[in-house]
Amino acid sequence: MIREELIGVLRSLLLAELSSVELYAAHADVIEEEAIARGVKAILEVEKEHAEKFMLRIKALGGDLPREAARAVTVGRAAGISSGGDVVAMLKAELAEEEQAVREYSRLVGEMKYDEDTLLLFASQLIDEIKHRGWLKKKLSELQKEREVAVKVEYISKSTS
Ligand SMILES: [Fe+2]
Ligand SMILES: [Fe+2]
């Protein structure tokens, strides 16, 4: 990957990170379950750091920041609101972004043959996204179990009344 190509990759990764900052920020505002809201806010802070690190890396390589940065923010916000306040739908939307990030960073870590600083940046962000994915999967399965139990309790109380 030549330097210009790498700057281009970093710029599009920056837009994706900014979009996920907005997605998590929109969800953090509306999730009522305290433990989940806390987890989402913790991920939000990490995504902000990711965006920040890409901005610094782009500048360090002598590149300009993308003009479309503002648009990525709008896309993320729209995706955040369209989940309609359902926490399972919100976590699923976040999980889809994390899966995408894990795939992208894994590929880049494998393909980078020079520029060790950028390679290490991709690798450290890959580890963060794997952790986010793991947390989201765990919370989603807990929520799904809770809902199954709630449905059974409702069924039992209906059939015994
Ligand atoms: Fe990220
Ligand atoms: Fe993430």
Image (cartoon, rainbow, N blue to C red):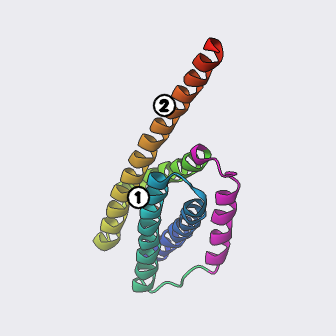
- Quick one: label 1 or label 2, which is nearer the N terminus? 1
Residue 155 found in image quarter? top right
Spatial CA span between label 1 and label 2: 36 Å
- Considering every residue shown, the one lying at the far front of the view is 161
**Secondary structure found at label 1:** helix
The amino acid at mark 2 is Lys
User: Which residue is located at x 40 percent, y 79 percent?
Assistant: 57
Q: Nearer the viewer, residue 58 or 28?
A: 28
Q: Residue at x 44, y 61 (%)?
A: 43
Q: Nearer the viewer, residue 85 or 2?
A: 85
**Up-down relation of residue 141 to residue 53 (above or below):** above
User: Callout 2 environment at 10 Å: few (<14), some (14 to 19), or many (20+)?
Assistant: few
Secondary structure beneath label 2: helix
Residues rendered magenta in the picture: 67-88
Q: Position of residue 94 (x, y in %)?
A: 54, 52
Judging by the rendered image, the residue that carries numbered circle 2 is 145
Q: Position of residue 131 (x, y in %)?
A: 36, 52
Q: Residues within 10 Å of mark 1 (few under 14, many from 20)?
A: some
Residue 160 seen from this side: yes
Percent x, y of residue 11: 53, 73
| CB of mark 1 near ligand 1 (< 8 Å) | no
In this view, 130 is above or below 28:
above
Q: Name the residue rendered at 44%, 85% in the picture.
A: 59
Magenta region, mostly helix, strand or loop? Answer: helix
Which residue occupies 57% across, 55% down? 31
Which residue is labeled 1 in the image? 108
Discs 1/2, front: 2
Q: Is residue 113 visible?
A: no
Q: Amino acid at mark 1?
A: Leu
